[in-house]
Structures are given as C-alpha cells and as structure tokens.
Amino acid sequence: MVQIALLLLPILVARDAPQFAASVEIASSGGLGRANRLVLGGNLVSYQEGGYGDTSPQSTNTGQGMWDPVAKAPVAGMVARAKAAGIKIARWPGGCAAHLYQWKRTIGPVGSRPNQRFGLPEFLTVCKAIGAQPLITLSDYAGTAQDAADFVEYLNSPADAAHPWAMRRAQDGHPKPVGAVWFEYGNESEHGPHKSNDDIGKVKPFTAAEYAAKFLEARARIRAVDPKVRLGAVISTGFPELDGWPSHVAKALGPNLDFAIHHSYIPGMWGARPELKTDSVFQHAWAAPDQIQRYYDKLNALLKSTTKRSSVPIAVTEFNGGFVQEEPVPYRHTLGNALLIAEMLRVFLEPKNNVAFANFWVFPNEYWGMVRGYSAPFVERPQFFPASLYASYLRDEILGVKVACPTYDVAGDSGMGIEPHRGLGAEFGFRGPAIPVEGSWTLMESTGMRHSQSGGTLEVEFDGSQDLNYFYARKTVPLVTKGTLRLTGWVRTEALTTTNGASFQIGDSRGWLATKSAMVTPSVVGTKPWTQVSVDYDPLPDTKELEVVARRLADAGVVSGKAWYRDVSIRPIRRASLAGVPLVSAFASRDKSGTSVFLVNKSLEAEAKVTVALGGKGGKAVLHLLSGPKAESTNETNPKAVRVTTQSLGKVGGKFLVRIPAHSMGVVVVSQG
C-alpha cells in the first residue's frame, strides 16, 4: 500500500464551534464488490507544435513537468507524487489536443523532433516509472483507420520484420511490446476539432452517424492487429440529455462499443460569476454527486438497451470541478473542489455504476494540475489529497453504508448545471400563467444570411458563406416574476447544415457580454418538421427585462439552409428537485487487516460528530484529516494551508465517535488485532 507523507499533529477543533450529529452504519456482510483502483487515473497531456492548447516548450518538451529533456528521464519528484496519487492508468495525449494529433511526429530520435522532446517513447517511459498502464486517445479528425492500426502495431506487436512500426518502437528504447489495452476514439468528438491545420484544412464537426462510421472502420483495423485491444467511443461530455448524440452513437455501434466515454465536469462555471457568493458556489458544487449518480443510472440503462448487452463499461477519461475563473480565487484549486473530487471518486467506486477507470484532468501543472512545479519544491494542491488518501487507504472489498444526518437545500443554478435539492424532493410543476412574448421580432442585418418575418413566423436563410453566429432577431419582455422560467418555442429547418442548428436563447436584456446570463435551447438541424424546443433559465437577482433571441451558435462550421422560428412562450415553473443534500457522506472498504471509512463533512461551519458502527469488531484506529481554514482555501501562496494531518484515536470498539471539522474529509483506518 502506497503511503503518503502526513503531518503528525493533533487535530484541534474549538469546543464552542457549532456541531451536528450524524451516524454511519457499515454492513457487516454482503460486500458490494471489489474496489477498482483504476478510478485513480490521471491525464498526462501532451501538446504538439501547431496544434491545440499550450504548445510552449514546457508542454511539448517536458510534458508539463513530467519529463526532464536534458537528463532524458522522468522527473523524480513528479513520479513520486503520481505514485502517491495512485495513478494506475495514464491518458495520452488527452484532451482536445488529440483531435489533430499526429503521433508519428512524436517518435524517432529526439534530434529529429527538437520541438517534441516529450513524445510517445517518453510517455511510455513515464508510465513504466509510475507503474501505470497507458490509455491512448486516437486522433478522430486528423487520423485515419490505418493510422490507428499503425499505432497499435507500434505499441503491441513484436519487433520483427513483419511489424515495421514495432521495430520503430524498439529503436525508440522499448524493445518489448507494451501490451496496451485501452484506446479511445477521439475526445469530445461531438463538439468539433476546435482548430484546423495545414495538413487537413478546415474540418467540420462530426454528426453522430459520421463518428460511428469512422469508429467502426478504425476498430476493425486495430483489432486485426491486436484483438485484445478495447476501443471506447465518445458518448457524452458533461451531462446532456441522452436522446441526442449519446443515443445515436450507442445505437450505431451496438455490440462493437467496447466502453463508453464520459467526461464529468460539474458544476460548470465557465467564467466569472461575481454575483455568486463563495459559500453558495460550494454548497451547489457539493450537491453534484446525486446528479452524477442519477446520470449514471440513466446512462447504464441506455447502454444496456441500445447495445443489447448486459453491461457496457463506462470510462470517465476526464473529470474535475468545472471551474474556469480566477476571482475571488481559482475555485479549481480550493479545498472545496477537493471535497467535490472526493465525492466524485466515491461515485466512481460504486460497483453498480460500472466505471472501468477514471482520469483526473490533469495531474501535472497546466491550468488544472493537482501538482504544481517544474522542479523542487513542488506544491501539492488541495485536489491532490483526495486521490492520495484513497490510494493509501482504499481496501479490497467495498461495503454498504447507511448514513443518517441533517441535510441542506440549494435553489439550483442552471448556469452551473446544478438542479434544486430540497427536502424530500419534488415533482415538476407550473407556478403561474405564461408571460406573453408578443409583437414583431426586432431585426438587425448582417452578412451570411437573409431574414424576414410574416404572420408571427421568422424565416432565416443561411447562404453558406461563413460559420455564422446568428443572433440578429430578438424580442424583449418585462420580468414580472421571480424564480425559474421555462422558454418554449417551435423551430422548423430545411437542409440546415452543421451540428449547431436553429435554437432559441433566453437571457438578461443587458446582454451576454454584460451579464454572462443566458441559456440556449437544444438546436434543430437537417430537414425537420416543426419541432418544440425548451430550456429553463434562472434570471439574475437584479434582472428587470428578458431578451428572447432566435439563435444559431457559431463554432460548428460553415452553415447553409433555412430555419423558421415561431410561437415563443415563457412560463414560471417549479423545477423538479432532488432531495436535500446530506451534510455527511460515507464510503467504506475492508480487507483482512481492517476497515477504512471515508467521511466528508459538507457543512461550511459546523463540526460533524459522527457515530460509526463498524458492523464488526473494533481495533486500533487512526484518523487522517484533509482540512483547511476555509472551503475557498488554496495552496497557491501558502503550500500548507490545505493539508492532511493524522491523529491516533486509540483502541475503538464496534461503535465509536469521530469528529470531522467543517468543510473537511476524514479517513478513519481501523486495524484488526
């Protein structure tokens, strides 16, 4: 078992601090399944000159600090921390860089690739040093089926005259076959390649059918090289409805879908939200695990019904809190996000979710890294510690647990993708009559389209000259009620190209640039009859007027065809809600030597007095505690602000009391004998 360095300090909690009681009952028999340590994977990203993302030398030559190009060796400090974080599967090149990635430019003598000194051979060396198996992201937009087959030959075939690419591997310092099993076809392929290059020109996003066809061709080629290889397909990014891309791809692939790829980023704060208080951000974020669990329930059911198989593994090849902002602090590097990561790991470890492996985005440096530094001293950010605690204290058998504790409610935030959580939960309902959306559309002129209106219907014709961001028809409506609103409208299309079609947007009339407050309905593409679309929207507290916009979002390729928009309405709703968020969550595992109980206290200010019933004998107990001054605490300026401390609890019986401070994670390790 990997051990992490812990500070041997007493855990002090002010006796006058607010407290609440909770209980955790652990099943004495009937374990849920074996613990899967592959959920502790990581992304070791590699960018390429002329490609997408950070193409600086620190990326292309050092792998964001994993590789020393001068010593031609892995960086020892990073390797040690990757081992401590339990990384058993490492993803490469990972992320949107993979869309146009040309792996053959990353092999061969380093002198022939001076701007790519961290390439595939170096990644394999790092994997060996860490003790991790590789997960390979194949290029979907630039790569071909033969290119994928060559990749598998390079990695897995014997180095002989019949396998010239494997001979290249041997020349690169890896004479034995790697035996790579896990390959994924593309990364978030539904949203397009982000960027074109001189080699392949302008590329439009795939449709689900186009993606499935390319997947099947690649799978046939690579399995002809090595039938043991498993190829995963991009099924969902974030938490979209499953009746679109996810369903279409799963149906098209059927039994050929070796595993389904999901990326879990929640909550989604894709920019500054100054109107949100920090406490509210974390209370909403910590509500996310229940939504993730419900999504995996639905996703597993979809995969079973579409593939006609008893189960299809899910691979969460990217996960993190979706915090893309810097003020008031970078939430992605906070204790609050670390507790969210701990909760995600708890969900991934649930055997019924059928998660084959998961890869944190990302391990070293970059924007998201859990470890910072290109040389000593390295900084272990808060999100490093949940992984290291699970790596150190996760045992073989997962146990059932029952938790009794107070709950808290959140109103929900559509901008963050967090649904309401209240009481025992509630069904959807309407709160009042519709808000009229009357009058003519206000039209603005632009290139790339012609539009007109007649009898309440707006007609737009896109001329195929550009990737048009259409927002040139709008109506304004006074906001007369507080709370969540549902916009509903009707759209018809004729030969409308690209994956971003005709939709409606509802937002603050002060505009997106001023408020960053708007929501867009699903879009309609191709040739479709009148189709109803809708979206729910939470106005800002100071919103006085709403704006409804006929939309077509850009960044999906040149668009041509026609779209019609009509019959827009807005109605106040009572959104369906999940039950209130438990203040304490628990996970337990055991082996012959003892039991580990993982606890998270989601209260922002109160200590949890948790009574733990082991369901068996007690023993010598130690508490390892991840904590910090505040949920928003980071290690950016003070590397020890958020840390793990340890304290002996002495000999405990089959039932005992443990105190977990506010906004903290505790691991109670009870050793037998």
Image (tube, rainbow, N blue to C red):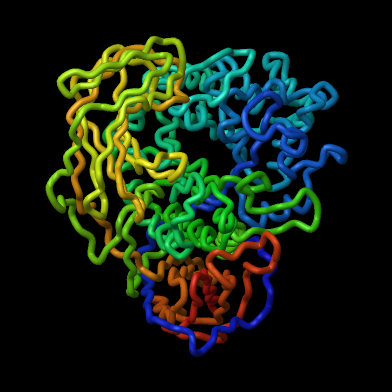
> Is residue 103 or residue 582 the one in the foreground?
582
- Expressed as whole percent of the image width and height from the top left, the position of residue 48 reads 69, 28
Location of residue 367 with respect to 646 vertically, above or below? above
Placement of the N terminus among the 4 image quadrants: bottom right
Classify residue 111 as left or right of residue 244: right
Farthest residue, direction bottom: 15
Would you identify the image quadrant in which residue 108 lies?
Answer: top right
Q: Can you say which quadrant of the picture contains the C terminus?
A: bottom right
| Residue 237 percent coordinates (x, y) | 43, 37
Closest to the observer: 663 or 469? Answer: 469
- Is 641 on the left or on the right of 236, as rendered? right
Residue at 18 percent of width and 18 percent of height: 454
Residue pictured at 29% horizontal, 35% vertical: 548
Compared across the picture, whether 511 is left or right of 223 comes to: left
| In the depicted structure, whether residue 621 falls above or below residue 290 | below
Q: Nearer the viewer, residue 417 or 671?
A: 417
